[in-house]
Amino acid sequence: MAEHMTRDIPAPAVSLESKPFFDAAREGRFLVKRCQACGEVHWYPRPICPFCHSDRTVWEESPGTGVVYTFSVMRRSPTGPYAIGYVTLDEGVSLMTNFVDMAPEDLRIGMRVKVKFQPTEGGPPVPVFAPA
Amino acid sequence: MSIKGKAYVMGAFEHPTRDAPDKTTAQLHLESAKGALDDAGLSFDDVDAYFCAGDAPGFGAMSMIDYMGLKNARHMDTTETGGSSYLVHLNHACQAIAEGKVNVALITLAGRPRNGGGRPGIPGGGAPKDGRLVDGAPEQGFESIYGGSTHNTYGMCAMRHMYEYGTTSEQLAWIKVAASHHAQWNEHAFLRDVVTVEDVVNSRMIADTLHLLDCCVVTDGGGAVIVTSPEVAKSLNRPRVKVLGAAEAPKAPMGGKDLDLTTCAAVWTGPKAFAEAGVTPADMKYASIYDSFTITVLMTLEDLGFCEKGQGGRFVADGNLISGVGELPFNTDGGGLCNNHPTNRGGITKVIETVRQLRGEAHPKVQVPNCDLALAHGTGGSLGVRHASATVIMEREG
């Protein structure tokens, strides 16, 4: 069996807007932002809804499940191949991520995946996705 | 044409804050935008043009267009001249409106120097230190950590295009093959060897599903272009290349709901530029198409309307882009794929080879006979994340 993909991820830049997300990440909780005015979830999380421009956006815990929209396995990497891609969450928004806990040849567009958190050096953990 | 009487300032708003410890620079831009739109009695959806300078976080105007949800923005300008930028933008907005390109332009400025915000033009963010919060591109903490590069973000587009439309690596390879056929005649080309489909698909995989030979070259270099008035053009002893139409547009994931990596902003710039020029894709004798990767060309040709969406693979196959062989000669200098991609920005070389073709000054082996109508198209940023497209249609006069 081929080796699982892994990649060291640097600490994310945390802003006033993203701090609650990364604070929750430290507790293993995956949050998204939903607008109470229009009911829509957006990604990446912002204080003002990009669809209806209401400031009534609230944090909501998500199961972090979805399907692989696309990916690319980076072969030219000193630490071995890693996969960047997008997941379309069941809430209907797509986000950039890395795929882990699988060999490159097992990764497929359309496969179901689930969030997990990967530690970073000197920063909060960040969301990555593994087979559901 | 003058701007005199052609445009109106209908909304204006000064943000009331003088100290903003609890809001990002991006949010101050958005709140300012909302204030001006409310003042005018317009909405974010009415905005079709966005103007900002170096104080706007992120890459050009693309990050803020996504952050603010300017879903109908099809024109942007990020001219940076320090404090005068916003008056330059006002003038440029009037020009775009007078040309009939846009109807509602939004100009924003914001910053937080009292709260650690850097000087405009110096990107905020970067690596967090001691748990301190950063105030950079709003998407930064959610994207820049995942090892994205041009190769793998364009690779994601190619993977999705293959998934949706059955496009193959062999079809993509034909784009490189055509470029190499042209580059063999260019004495300055970085790569002059003619390659085959087999050479491309057997070259090493860089980022699925782009091989080494699906990628453009990395070169030093430069270029320049002179644009003149009709009077100056007529006074000069050179063939006249007349601009007939042009358009530019950004494209972004827009709150995560509009991620579509098989379509680029050429889908908006193409129709607009062709309409202004009064011509169609079928009229083009030659096309310079931005070719950072083979997939860039394939998606652009589809979105400009040279073939139906999803048919790009069939369109480029069997030498259809080779001068003297196919129906649409492209990048006859060898393009970014073989000739030159100075400072990783291929836009100006696209204009230069279009001018050579229209003047009849391309290499005789690749010169398109009677080349009187041509197109140049540029792609900036990443098709796999956020990007902006620009299309210019030109004609030989006389």
Image (spheres, grey):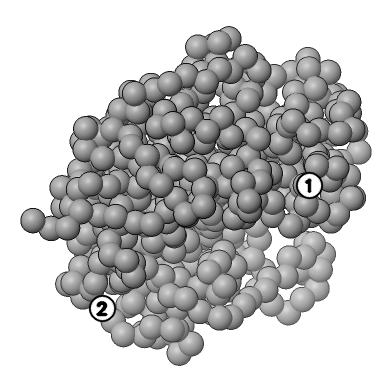
Q: Residues within 10 Å of mark 2 (few under 14, many from 20)?
A: some
Q: Given contact means CB atoms under 8 Å apart, are the residues at marks 1 and 2 in contact?
A: no
| Closer-to-camera residue (A115/B277) | A115
Q: Which mark is residue B95?
A: none
Looking at the image, residue B161 sits to the left or right of residue B126; the answer is left
| Closer-to-camera residue (B287/B395) | B287
Look at the picture and state if B368 lies above or below B272: below
Looking at the image, residue B294 sits to the left or right of residue B101; the answer is left
- Mark 2, secondary structure of its residue: loop
Residue B56 visible in the current orientation: yes
Nearer the observer: mark 1 or 2; the answer is 1
Pinpoint residue B34: horizontal percent, then vertical percent.
Answer: 75, 23
* Location of residue B127 (image quadrant): bottom right
* Location of residue B82 (image quadrant): bottom right
Residue at mark 1 shares a chain with residue at mark 2: yes
The residue that label 2 is drawn on is: B195
Which part of the image, by quadrant, shows the C terminus of chain B?
bottom right
Looking at the image, residue A54 sits to the left or right of residue B38; the answer is left
State the residue at coordinates (31%, 85%).
B193
State the residue at coordinates (44%, 59%).
B149
State the residue at coordinates (48%, 30%).
A24
Q: Which mark is residue B116?
A: 1
Pinpoint residue B247: horizontal percent, then vertical percent.
Answer: 61, 46
